Structures are given as structure tokens and as C-alpha cells.
Image (cartoon, rainbow, N blue to C red):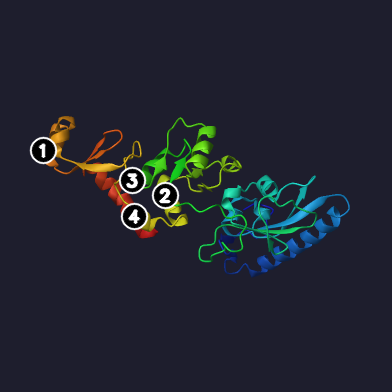
Amino acid sequence: MSDTHPVQALLFDYGGVIAEEGFASGLMALATEQALRVNLLDEGMQKHDSFVRLRFYAELNDFLLPWQQQTNFHQRFEQTPSVKDLIESVGIPHTEIRLILVDSKPVDFNYAVKHKDHISIYPAFKRLDISTISKTQPSPLSTLSFVLDTHLGKLARHLRMLGLDTAYKNDFNDEELAHISACERRIRLTRDRNLLKRKVIEHGYFVRETDAVAQLKDIVLHFRLKHKIQPFSRCIVCNGQLRRIDKKRIQHQLHPMTRQHYEDFKQCKNCGKVYWKGSHYVKMNTTLSTILSET
């Protein structure tokens, strides 16, 4: 938390601000300061600036500065920007947003903001169906597939390990990634929020974690993938589908110890890589079991 924040020990969850025991007075001070800030900003801006009042909910606060989190704040603007451009100027990609309310009425990304609009912005709802009221929901995907930025190679291998269709190359450029996401209707995963602001990208997600296993858990939970997992059905190298192969057909590719100790094999239909249940399988299965038990 910032040194200027009046409460140092706040816990931010997806529903709001939670204070540790003993910090109730701190919360009251925070609420008083916020109300005073809103009134002062209103008075200071009315004569000279166009502004809106913004409020972001749940995990959208991950993108905000500490003083902007879990509260209303003002954002100045010039001319007549779209609400998409205004929100992204704060640092939140449109792909993270599922509902925008302006003075309690739903709008789409093209809405032209007006002076003193009160804008509430929401991420995906985990339990409520908002499809009948939202005007920012992306068009539904018939199947879930992904395209990953070049810095997410470990996550790509883990997703493929789960049998999830994952496009990845370590030499894709930004234009190629945007094109693949749009044309193949793949969800773009990245840790660069600016890459999700391209208008052509309809489906995307900002990967918050830095550790590959933690990233995988986050993706499985966010996209509710637990029941879509088909472990060890895709090649972790090229994303091709695996098929069972008779040992006699590939034994010339095997090391002597592998030929001696293993009988069951799979082969990638695309690149021909051969898989068997060796030590690498045991390690990946352990990772898989951990993820399934925690999601």
C-alpha cells in the first residue's frame, strides 16, 4: 500500500474492502477522506474541466493505483472520448470488462462520455447471468482455445499438458498474435495489458501471476476449465493431438532403456514426437493433481 494511504493493513478481496480486526477506525477515516475528496474535486473541476466519476469493481481493481481502488474517483477528459478509450486510459483493457453502467443504465464501448457521468465498471460475474442487460459482452465462443504471448512459454506447455488447444511460438510478433486471436477466435493471454487494448481483440485475459503453475490455476479457475481438461492428449511442443502408437512402429526412435521398460506410447500427429509414462510423465501428473485439487 502507498505510504499516503490512511489505512495500512487493508485486505482487498473481490467483493470489497475488508479491514483486519482493530482497523475499524481506520476505515472510518478512509471513508471520510474519500467523501471529502469527492466533494472537493467536484467543486474544483466544475468550472474548468470536463470529468466523470468512475468506480471499478472486483478484480478490475488489480489494475488501479492504491488511491483509486474500491472507491469513486474522478477522471478528466477532453473532447468526447468513447467510454472504452476513457477506461483504457486509466489502464484497464476492454477485454476485462463485462458490464458498464452510466448513471445506472447499461452502455456499450462506443458510448460517448459526458461531463459528470457516473460510470460503474464490472468484470465477469461468476454466478449471475448478465447477458440480457450487458452491452459489452463479447460474442460467445463455440470452443475455448488460446493464443499466448512469447513470454508465456511455460504456461503454454502446461495448458497443452491439460489438453487445451494453445497456439504459441516464441517468435510471434504482436501483429501476428492479434491476427490469430481475431481470425481464429482464440483467447489472447498476456502479461502486457496494453496488448489487450487493441480494438480487434475481442477475447483476452491479463495473466496476473508470474509463476507458471500459479498462472495455470488462475486460468483454469477464471475460464472454468476443470471439466474441459483432457490430460496428455496434446503435444506440449507443437499443440498437435496425440494418438496411441504401436511400439513396433517407433522402436527405432527409442533409447535402449526406454524400449526395455515401457510398452505404451503415444505420438503427435503433427510433429511425430513420441511420449511414454516416464519420469517426465510422473512430474507432470503431480502438477496436474495439484491443480485439480485446488481449483
Horizontal side of 227 relative to 28 (left or right) equals left
Taking depth in this image into account, of 168 and 203 the one nearest to the observer is 203
> Considering depth in this image, is 72 or 143 the residue closer to the camera?
143
Q: CA distance from mark 1 to mark 3?
A: 26 Å
Give, as a three-letter code, the residue at label 1. Answer: Gln
The answer to whether residue 247 is above or below residue 11 is above
N-terminal of the two: label 2 or label 1?
2
Q: Which circle's residue, 1 or 3, is located before the other in the chain?
A: 3
Point out residue 243 in the picture as x, y percentages from the top left corner: 24, 43
Secondary element at image label 4: helix
User: Closer to the camera: disc 1 or disc 4?
Assistant: 1
Q: From mark 4 to mark 3, how far is it between C-alphas?
A: 14 Å
Question: Do labels 3 and 2 touch, CB within 8 Å?
Answer: no
Quarter of the rendering containing residue 17: bottom right
Q: Which of the two discs, 1 and 3, sits closer to the camera?
A: 3
**Measured from the top left, where is residue 36 in percent x and y?**
78, 62
Sequence-first tag of 4 and 3: 3
**Side (left or right) of 229 relative to 255:** right
Give the residue pinned by disc 3: 161
Q: Amino acid at mark 2?
A: Leu
Dot 2 crowding, Cα within 10 Å, few <14, some 14–19, many 20+: many
Badge 4 local density, few (<14 within 10 Å), some, or many (20+)?
Answer: few
Residue 216: mark in rendering: 2
Q: Position of residue 74 (x, y in %)?
A: 75, 54
Q: Which residue is mark 4?
A: 290
Q: State the separation of the CA atoms marked 2 and 1.
A: 35 Å
Element type where label 3 sits in the image: helix
The residue at which mark 1 appears reads as: 260
